[in-house]
Image (spheres, coloured by chain):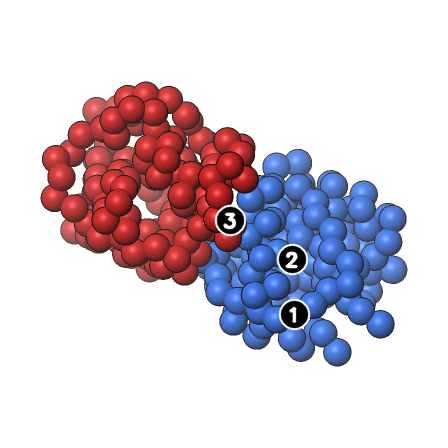
Chain colours: A blue, B red
């Protein structure tokens, strides 16, 4: 069965860039969703969970760190892997968001190889 | 002390990394005089506060901004790029540059918190943070075709 992906970023352009970079990495998803912030992402998850969420941190309405905490409270999303994609890259922040339930971290600027490295372990 | 950190070098190095990795364009510093970008321009701006406070901006002509957004999105035709796409792209470029600057500053000055990007479209756009702020500017050649202006206004936190 194919995998599903949700990209959460307040920049529509960045969502397109991430989608393009994921494709360039060679990873394939049967279903892809987009959300502009944490609130939108939670609303879309009510309509169906996804296997992987790529999530920005600095967003209006609900930031990425709060979204991670909220997703981890949803039983249906127990198997959902969350990879943060952000310009923020302090070790303190990375440790904190991983402790809250994120499964990985990709810093902007990024390359297709970085997505390949971080997402491949969750594709099988 | 802040002046000794080589802010200009940090900004330029960060911008080069962003342009090479995400925009697939080379940039080099140019010795052109420090003047505003002529004609219609787009400015992407991020404010920050913490160990330092201020803002970082990238300003370039509208055609330059369109080319940057086309490269970021992998689109060949300018007609396929909307004004919203172009503004969004320039905001993200500023966001990524300041993210790299933040990483450098964390090792020397301390942590800064950054805002979400703002984008201004207009003529003769200027930043101002008051008389006690330091201003660092650098003009860069993009693929020997366009010129963009990077600027960082900063001062020690008043808190």
Query: Which residue is identified by label 1?
Result: A27
The image shows residue B36 at horizontal and vertical percentages of 23, 28
Q: Is residue A86 visible?
A: yes
State the separation of the CA atoms marked 1 and 2.
13 Å
Chain letter of the residue carrying label 3: B
Q: Where does the C terminus of chain A fall, quadrant-wise?
A: bottom right
Relative horizontal placement of residue B49, taking residue B11 as reference (left or right): right
Q: Nearer the viewer, residue B66 or B41?
A: B66
The image shows residue B40 at horizontal and vertical percentages of 34, 25
Q: Where does the N terminus of chain A fall, quadrant-wise?
A: bottom right
The disc placed on residue B91 is: none
Q: Quadrant of residue B56?
A: top left
Disc 2 crowd, CA 10 A, few/some/many (<14, 14-19, 20+): many
- The residue sitting at 37% across, 32% down in the picture is B62
- The residue sitting at 44% across, 31% down in the picture is B119
Query: Which residue is identified by label 2?
Result: A54
Q: Nearer the viewer, residue A82 or B111?
A: A82
The image shows residue A85 at horizontal and vertical percentages of 56, 57
Helix, strand or loop at label 3? It is loop
- The residue sitting at 67% across, 42% down in the picture is A37
Query: Which residue is identified by label 3?
Result: B75
Mark in the foreground, 1 or 2:
1
Chain letter of the residue carrying label 2: A
Helix, strand or loop at label 1? It is loop
Q: Quadrant of residue B32?
A: top left
State the separation of the CA atoms marked 2 and 3.
23 Å
Q: Nearer the viewer, residue A109 or B82?
A: B82
């Amino acid at each position: 069965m194919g995998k599903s992906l949700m990209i959460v970023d307040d920049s529509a352009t960045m969502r397109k860039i991430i989608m393009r970079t994921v494709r360039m990495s060679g990873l394939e998803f049967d279903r892809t969703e987009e959300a502009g912030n944490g609130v939108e992402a939670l609303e879309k998850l009510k309509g169906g969970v996804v296997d992987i969420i790529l999530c920005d941190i600095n967003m209006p309405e609900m930031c990425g760190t709060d979204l991670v905490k909220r997703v981890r409270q949803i039983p249906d999303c127990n198997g959902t892997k969350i990879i943060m994609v952000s310009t923020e890259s302090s070790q303190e922040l990375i440790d904190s968001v991983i402790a809250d339930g994120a499964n990985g971290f990709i810093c902007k600027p990024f390359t297709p190889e970085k997505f390949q490295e971080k997402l491949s372990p969750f594709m099988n | 002390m802040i002046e000794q950190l080589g802010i200009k070098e940090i900004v330029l190095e960060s911008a080069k990394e962003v342009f090479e990795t995400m925009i697939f364009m080379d940039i080099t510093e140019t010795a052109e005089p420090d003047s505003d970008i002529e004609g219609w321009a787009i400015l992407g701006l991020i404010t920050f506060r913490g160990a330092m406070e201020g803002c970082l901006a990238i300003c370039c002509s509208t055609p330059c901004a369109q080319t940057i957004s086309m490269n970021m999105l992998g689109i060949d035709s300018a007609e396929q790029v909307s004004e919203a796409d172009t503004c969004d792209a320039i905001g993200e470029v500023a966001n990524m540059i300041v993210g790299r600057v933040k990483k450098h500053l964390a090792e020397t000055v301390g942590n800064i918190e950054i805002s979400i990007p703002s984008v201004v479209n207009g003529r003769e756009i200027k930043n101002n943070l008051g008389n006690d702020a330091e201003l660092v500017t650098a003009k860069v050649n993009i693929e020997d075709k366009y010129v963009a202006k990077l600027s960082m206004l900063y001062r020690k936190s008043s808190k």
